[in-house]
Amino acid sequence: MKRVFVIGIGAGDPDYITLQAIKALNQVDVFFVAGKGSEKSDLNALRREVCERHITGRHYRMVEFTPGKRDNPADTYRASIDICNDDLEKTYERLLADETRDGECAGFLVWGDPSLYDSTLRLLNRIRARGAVAFEFEVIPGISSIQALAAKHKVALNEVGNSVEITTGRKLAQAMPDAGSVVVMLDAKGAYRELPDQDMTIYWGAYVGAPDEILVAGKLKDVSAEIDRLRTEARVRKGWIMDSYLLKREE
């Protein structure tokens, strides 16, 4: 029987990894990593560093694959994502069938935590249900970008008696959630600029935990222009950006 570990490796610092994850890393025979593009290149360099730092006395191999593109033509955002995930599901199934020998352990190194805005678990469950490839898999939780962001800014996510909502920039542009604290991920267009309540406090971070980490905090009306400038400069410099932010209403 083939085995699979889905391992959360944290948000950017190779030390953002649990003892459980280290134990799992040292059982993997083959790691599957996405290739192509400057973002994938940077993230894979960190994945390799995690393996080199924490795997001891064990031979393993890495197999790169080309992920599906999210800019596939489709009528809706959801349809575009479905097309991308269908392609990725076929790729994962092929990798498990052709690149993993019986009795071997395969590993997917997931940025942050596998349960948060990542498709790996959904796709593996669909592959298992179809039954073309027999395997067992285990999920190793990781430190998410949300946890790392709050730690870097030295704030709690929630206020006493209030809730926290996690959403995306696309959803935030449609309506501000009715929660005391709102964590926003995947905001490519800077939806925070259009919020009616500009007196909220924002805690923003890009590449959190990585050597080129950027942090900004303050009243939204005072720092949104600075965040825009830093985001633009970082995207030009690196070719990609990975950022998130926490919004808090005044008590």
Image (cartoon, grey):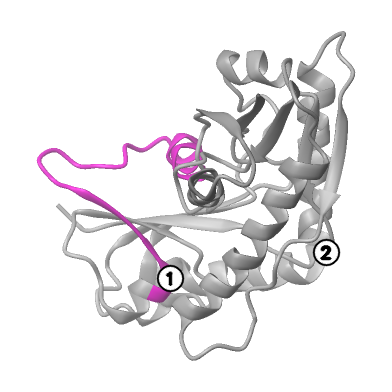
Asked if residue 133 is among those painted magenta in the image, a careful observer would answer no
| Residue nearest the viewer, comparing 120 with 250 | 120
Query: Disc 2 and disc 1: Cα gap in Å?
Result: 23 Å
Query: Of marks 2 and 1, which one's residue comes earlier in the chain?
Result: 2
| Image coordinates for residue 46, horizontal then vertical, percent | 78, 39
As helix, strand or loop, the secondary structure at mark 2 comes to loop
In this figure, which residue is indicated by the disc labeled 1?
169
Q: Position of residue 10 (x, y in %)?
A: 59, 35
| Residue at the extreme top of the image, as rendered | 57
The relative height of residue 8 versus residue 225 in the rendered view (above or below) is: above
What kind of residue is marked 2? Gly
> In this image, 178 relative to 219: left or right?
left
Would residue 217 be visible to someone looking at this image?
no
Residue 49 seen in render: yes
Q: Which residue is mark 2?
A: 37
Type of residue at label 1? Gly
Q: Position of residue 31 (x, y in %)?
A: 77, 35
| Residue 62 figure quarter | top right
**Front: mark 2 or 1:** 2
Which residue appears at 34% of the width and 72% of the height? 172
Dot 2 crowding, Cα within 10 Å, few <14, some 14–19, many 20+: few
Answer whether residue 157 is magenta in the image: yes
Residue nearer the viewer, 123 or 73: 123
Q: Magenta segment, which residues?
A: 145-170
Left or right: residue 161 compared with residue 171:
left
